[in-house]
Image (cartoon, rainbow, N blue to C red):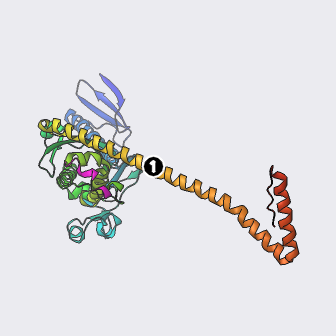
Amino acid sequence: MRQSQRLTDGAEYRIDADAETFTKMGCCNPWIPLAADSLREYHHLNRIMLIITGCIVGFVAWFLVSYLLAGLYTVNQNERAVKTIFGRVERVGDLTTSDDPISEPLNADEKTRYTYPQVRVIMPGGPYFKWPWEKIIKVSIATETLNMARDPEDPTANGNGSILEAVTKDQLNTGLTGQIRYRVSERNLYAYLFGVKRPLSHVMGYFVSVLRERIANFEVPPAGKAPESATTGLDIASVAGISINDIRKNLRDLNEHMDNECRSSAARYGMVLDASLITGIDPPPEVESALAAINTAYNQVSSDISLAQAGADQKIVQSRRAVEIETLRAQAEVEPLSRMASQLSDLKKSGSGALTAYVRNVRLGLFEKAQNVFVEARK
């Protein structure tokens, strides 16, 4: 049985099934018998070539997808990014944070300790491209709120992150509650990503240490003007005598002090403390009743002093008004006399006869108003 068919090389072969041979047509010697082993070897080599070609095409496709298409990236609006080349972050020349105004809150010693290189920040947008040996690190700069009593390393500390304890200047252990707002500083990303291992833990530790130091040494800020009650020898602020009361009355000053002290956190750890808000100060339970009594007495004394000052101020105002009224009355009585004296001086300048006539006319007017006139007769 013989059949003719075309193989992969495009030539026509004639196969003899009985003799297991085939011949190739279209050549100089049209009948060249080939063994079946040669045919199988040909197909085997053909399959190997197809596999090698497929591997090459697959590798090229994988390289294009993995390193060219995957090299495209974008940066969201609430993110900033930095690029590392073989593990080294891309920097801005030889500039450091000491050349940036961010280091102004630091003193001379701290500037030498907290000096980081300035890195090139990739702003929001895209798509950008990176090579396979480059790596992009993205950081969210969104502002976040955190309980001031939270410990990032130990969630069970400070009453499971619910209240922060501090000791006042009169050795009272008080509890503080509040929140802080923080965000990553895009002007010092090197410190946040590479300079500090756990930036949030460092920032929280720094904030708590500054707060406890302030609570332990807190004093009532001096008033800009001495109160009027100082003349009586009574200092209203000294009535309470307890630092917890002073802190409660000056929470705003305490929060402002914490904001000023924490302005250096960006240069230290690459994180910005936007604001701190201390909302509650809870005294120990054993002194709660004593503090309540002290506050009640303080409020009563303050009320009495305020009433006394109001009464004194009212009397002073009334006296001033009475003096003003009497002064106006005296001026009203003096004004006609002054005008009359001015008129008489003008008449006198006109001549002695004019003044005599004026006096006579005045007397006649008085006679018209008088009901009885007594005339002295001279003997």
Q: Which of 330 and 300 is in front in this view?
A: 330
Q: Is residue 352 left or right of residue 136?
A: right
Q: Is 328 located above or below residue 296 in the figure?
A: below
Task: Point out the stretch of residues depicted in magenta.
Answer: 230-241
Whether residue 232 is in magenta: the answer is yes
Q: Dot 1: what SS?
A: helix
State the residue at coordinates (83%, 78%): 349
* Residue appearing at x 57%, y 56% in the figure: 324
Q: Where on the picture, by quarter, is residue 359? A: bottom right
**Which residue corresponds to the image point at 38% horizontal and 53% vertical from the top-left?**
129
Residue 233 place in picture, x, y as percent: 27, 56
Quarter location, residue 56:
top left
Q: Between 211 and 147, which is closer to the camera in this rendering?
A: 211
The residue to which callout 1 is attached is 315
Residue at image coords 80%, 54%: 373
* Residue 49 seen from this side: no
Quadrant where the N terminus is found in the figure: top left
